């Protein structure tokens, strides 16, 4: 569900939320250069959206390689969007920036931790469950299972990866919960 929400946010920012650069009656007060950025940046946002569509909500987190691809698309889009001076454009990209920060967390610190935990032979039952294929489960079953094991998973994250990664895990818990089917 969250990936769908994030896709909607990105798509809306890319196609509906930005001021139209071809509109001579610009009610947003944006410069011509800023309006042209909306056309320039749109394909970069679309690449990210297309990558995210490969991972439907409720089916777990994307793998680290896919997160790196998403992060590269985020960085490309942010470099493009950050050039905008117009507040209307900058306001419409706040959610996009937050999403990219979450992808960065998942692709970097948590991504490395996740890989280590997934490959560990001494992980707990709860982490074994967390990294197993749950495609046969309903979103409710997956969500309930995560809620039952959340504290144990957090302990494994802290033990394996340290307090900083655990803190980042907690800060991004809303995203993680939506990815495991909790709406």
Image (cartoon, rainbow, N blue to C red):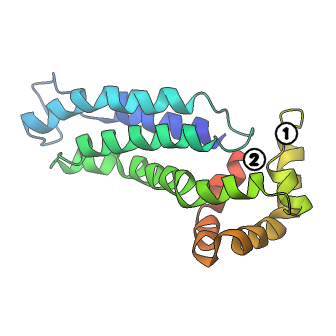
Residue situated furthest front in the rendering = 121
Q: Which residue has dot 2 on it? A: 180
Residue at the top extreme, as displayed? 22
Q: Position of residue 145 (x, y in %)?
A: 88, 54
* Numbered marks: total: 2
Residue 60 found in image quarter: top right
Q: Check if mark 2's residue and mark 1's residue have beta carbons within 8 Å.
A: yes
* Picture residue at 83% right of the left edge, 69% below the top: 152
Secondary element type, mark 2: loop
The residue that label 1 is drawn on is: 134
Closer to the chain start, of discs 2 and 1, is 1
Above or below, 148 relative to 141: below
Instruction: Report the Cα–Cα distance between label 2 and label 1.
Output: 9 Å
* In the image, residue 151 above or below residue 180: below
State the image quarter where residue 162 is shown. bottom right
Across and down, in percent, residue 6 comes to: 53, 41
Image x and y of residue 133, in percent: 83, 39
Horizontal and vertical percent for residue 105? 52, 57
Residue 89 relative to residue 180: left or right: left
Dot 1, how many residues are within 10 Å of its Cα: few (below 14), some (14-19), or many (20+)?
some
Left or right of 30 in this view: 141: right
Residue found farthest to the bottom: 163
Classify 38 as above or below 160: above
């Amino acid at each position: 569900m969250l990936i769908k929400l994030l896709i909607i946010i990105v798509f809306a920012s890319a196609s509906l939320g930005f001021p139209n650069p071809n509109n001579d009656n610009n009610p947003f007060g944006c410069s011509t250069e800023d309006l042209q950025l909306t056309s320039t940046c749109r394909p970069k946002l679309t690449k990210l959206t297309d990558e995210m569509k490969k991972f439907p909500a409720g089916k777990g987190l994307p793998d680290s390689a896919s997160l790196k691809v998403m992060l590269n698309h985020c960085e490309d889009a942010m470099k493009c969007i950050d050039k905008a001076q117009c507040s209307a454009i900058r306001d419409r990209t706040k959610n996009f920036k937050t999403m990219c920060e979450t992808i960065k967390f998942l692709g970097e610190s948590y991504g490395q931790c996740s890989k280590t935990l997934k490959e560990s032979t001494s992980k707990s039952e709860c982490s074994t469950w967390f990294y197993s294929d749950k495609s046969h489960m309903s979103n409710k079953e997956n969500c309930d299972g995560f809620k039952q094991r959340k504290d144990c998973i957090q302990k494994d994250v802290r033990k394996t990866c340290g307090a900083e990664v655990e803190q980042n895990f907690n800060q991004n818990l809303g995203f993680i919960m939506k990815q495991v089917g909790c709406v």
